Amino acid sequence: MTDLEGELRRAVRGDVGFDVTSRALTTMDASNYRRVPLGVVAPRDADDVAAVLAVCRERGVPVVARGGGTSIAGQATGTGVVLDFTRHMNRLVSLDPGAREAVVQPGLVLDRLQEAAAPHGLRFGPDPSTHSRCTLGGMIGNNSCGSHSVAWGTTADSVRELDVVTARGARLRLGQQWAGAPEGLRALAEGELARLRTGFPELPRRISGYALDALLPEKGADVARSFCGSEGTLGVLTQAVVRLVEAPRACALAVLAYADEAAAAQAAAGLLPYGPLTVEGMAADLVPSTAALPRGGAWLFVETGGKSEGEARARAEAIVRAADVLDSLIVTDPAGQRTLWRIREDASGTATRMPDGSEAWPGWEDCAVPPARLGAYLRDFRALLTSHGLKGTPYGHFGDGCIHVRIDFDLLTEPGIARFRRFSEDLAELVVAHGGSLSGEHGDGQARAELLPKMYGTEMVALFERAKGVWDPDDLLNPGILVRPSPLDADLRFSVLPREPVDVVFGYPADGGDFSAAVRRCVGVAKCRTTSAAGSSVMCPSFRATGKEEHSTRGRARLLHEMLAGELVTDGWRSTEVRDALDLCLSCKGCRSDCPVEVDMATYKAEFLHHHYEGRRRPAAHYSMGRLPLWLRWVERTRTAPLVNALASVRPLAALAKRLGGIAPERRIPRVATQTFGRWWSRRPATSSSGGDLVVLWPDTFTEHLSPAVGQAAVRVLEAAGLRVALPPTVALAKAPVGDGRTVALDPLSLLRGRGRVCCGLTYVSTGQLDRARTVLRRTLDLMDPVLDTGAPVVVLEPSCAAALRSDLPELLADDPRAARLAAAVVTFAEALEKYAPHWKPPAVHRPVTGQTHCHQHAVLGDGSDRRLREAAGLTGDLAGGCCGLAGNFGFEKGHYEVSASCAEDQLLPAVRGAADGAVVLADGFSCRTQLDQLAGVRGRHLAEVLAGALDEEGS
């Protein structure tokens, strides 16, 4: 392997990676399969591709072309050299609006092409649900389709010419009338004309096998079209000329509700004469919440287009009138349409979990039948599932007769794998009986190629093998895929994982306490690889900053998978490869909400760091910032805040402190409050104990020591709303004087139990100091015991601390029932006002807002109450998504500054710069406010501060 690596490095200008990380990141795609490559090459151009093929041909090493790695059937994995086109060969070469053509490289992400075409009123027709990360090369390789295929067909319908390098180094430009055909292809096709005319089923989503019928003279002998869907087995694509279509100026989305999926499927074909752009279907068991959908058990998403909104709506209304529906909804607002489409697009991920939380997997992801037979096929399909004791949630392209489904296969045990094979064989026969195709969108790969004889017969499959021999006589390109296939039950990704649960600290309740099951959540749909955070989404800021797979949620999950497998990553929790990939994870928790299967990489990172550094010296930042609550309490007790601030203002001393503490030299050390929030509280006049509901205000470390003004403002607003405010006890008491706004001991003996401060343990969790976090949290529960007995809500002002109490606390202390009680008691500032002071009207601010929703609030807490409170106060506008990039200790750690600043530039800083005059800059998190101050010189304010200021103005 070393000789191969060296020879490739000498032969190509692109990147060559034979290291553990590069290989581990490409062992899997979005399928059930895993194959370990020898190395990965990211070519810079067609010359590099030809050079790689020459080196590998001489050594007999297979080559696999890979785009976004979102293939469902296993065709983007291989045991030889993987070509990664996303790194360099990812450009839009040209776009000709007049000719409605674009020239693209294989690694170009579909959304980038759509963005470039949109100003010209054009678009690329096919649009798979992975459009934000799938590549044009991968779409051509799989002949992808997407939701608009009823209008604009498959990728093959949008291809004009293809530049291809064959395994033996020939450079061909494929087109119609035999253009670019390799020697022998025309003779092969013309010798089998009868078979090509009769051997392929006529249906819109026939993707299985090679499209040799495209070579028929009556079809223009289109070599480029016949190459589409060949899954990297015939040649390596280096450039493509693709057709664009006119995009409708306006669209309407009609959501049609039916009693069940069979009724929806039966109705779909009848809507096609009305010229819809989409006819997508899904059932209730795939939707987390049906609140946004019309009443029913299954829905068709039918999009119509027009030159105006009125025309698009009229067409949608005509379809609603023609459809026999239980209920319907028509949406013309683009934002509303995006919200509804997101429900459908996330199905490929959400389908991997059944309603009861059990796992479900691809394998029979996209069979297609004639649309008119879809209803009957679905009924037979459901019956087949039941007969095998399996469950699945079908959805997909009902207008084209193509069904996606994830099934709860047991791919971990021998009996389960045997049932997987039996079901696969039976389903293949069922699909063929209905006149269908084993693949209707994602290709055959390893999942279905073995069963192609059931669909085509042995003679046609033999013809496929002969065609492969014409293009690739040495079987160099993606062997084991499509022809002479590997068994469908070989190379399963789960076979290498440990069978016994891994000893971990977090509880992983959603995964049965099994860390392996938590890691298995990532199925590879790669929503984390998007280059822009759409709307309010957060995931994955580090990938957007670096563009590297190892810094995506999927990449980190792959490395954790390989760590558990122990084949590539051999040193387990001590792995430096996993550590380095996790190092740039901001622990923003964006993946917890934005990943369709709710991968929680922040928790996995904390778990890994705990084991990685167990019994070993930690990085300096873990001591300086991971134990920040401890250091700040010492400053408070010694009354040395003025001294600390003075020393931090002396550059040489600050530089020394930052070097010793592992802090980025570019950062300024935040000032410590000379009067803590707790000291301010103890000195304020006592308030009446009568009146409204009691709320207990959580004095988090940041509010207590670094921004006490936020706590003071919150008290001002909560009391103005008629609520009684108290702080948690600082001594462990059998009973507590909770509710009088004071914290005192009831008897002298209680003082012997020790004074302390409640703490959410966030800084310990984020640095993986989980033993210390559990100790801190147990002490916190002891202090909070009397508060829990009152049933009072606990108002937490810092979103990251609230998220830690809501999610990390019950997972770290699952054995302590008080943990779940405290987690349930936690409310945000806005939630407290909405729930416990519902009739209070906030002061009128009447100003626009800018800023960013805190990433932890977005991921764990939700911001509905905040938006309603802002609206009630006359604060207009929406906050940006993404992550500020500081993320607690992350942005302060040495080596993280550049990525931290890049994350801020993703959404936060542009939103602030582009804000209207007089806009209020909202930033509820201390990290967000610090980032704004240090990178933009802008003061962000907590919502409590804004409302308190308005109250003071009203009273003045």
Image (tube, rainbow, N blue to C red):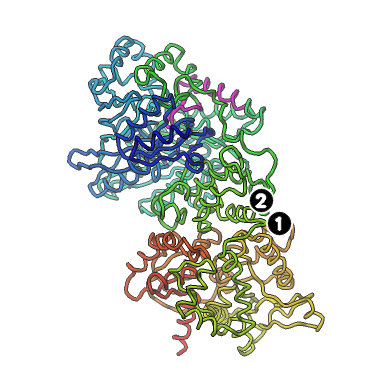
Q: Nearer the viewer, residue 329 or 923?
A: 923
Give the image location of residue 552, x and y in percent. 47, 49
Q: As drawn, which residue projects farthest toward the right? A: 749
Q: Nearer the viewer, residue 87 or 953?
A: 87
Residue sitting nearer the eye, 882 or 953 = 882
What percent of the width, then of the height, locates residue 193?
31, 11
- Assess disc 1: are there few (<14), some (14-19) or many (≥20) residues with their C-alpha within 10 Å of its C-alpha: some
Which mark, by number, is residue 918? none
Mark 2 = which residue?
Answer: 509
Question: How many angstroms separate mark 2 from mark 1 (CA)?
Answer: 9 Å
Question: At x 59% / y 71%, what residue is drawn?
Answer: 628
Amino acid found under the numbered disc labelled 1 = Ala
Amino acid beneath label 2: Pro
Q: Residues within 10 Å of mark 2 (few under 14, many from 20)?
A: few
The answer to whether one can see residue 206 in this image is no
- Please say if 594 is above or below 71: below
Q: Residue at x 35, y 30 (%)?
A: 236
On whether residue 95 falls in the magenta region, the answer is no
Check disc 1 and report its element: helix, strand or loop.
loop
Tags 2 and 1 in contact by the CB under 8 Å rule?
yes
Q: Main secondary structure of the magenta part?
A: helix
Picture quadrant of residue 899: bottom left
Q: Position of residue 190 (x, y in %)?
A: 29, 11
Q: Is residue 297 left or right of residue 516?
A: left
Q: Which residue is mark 1?
A: 814
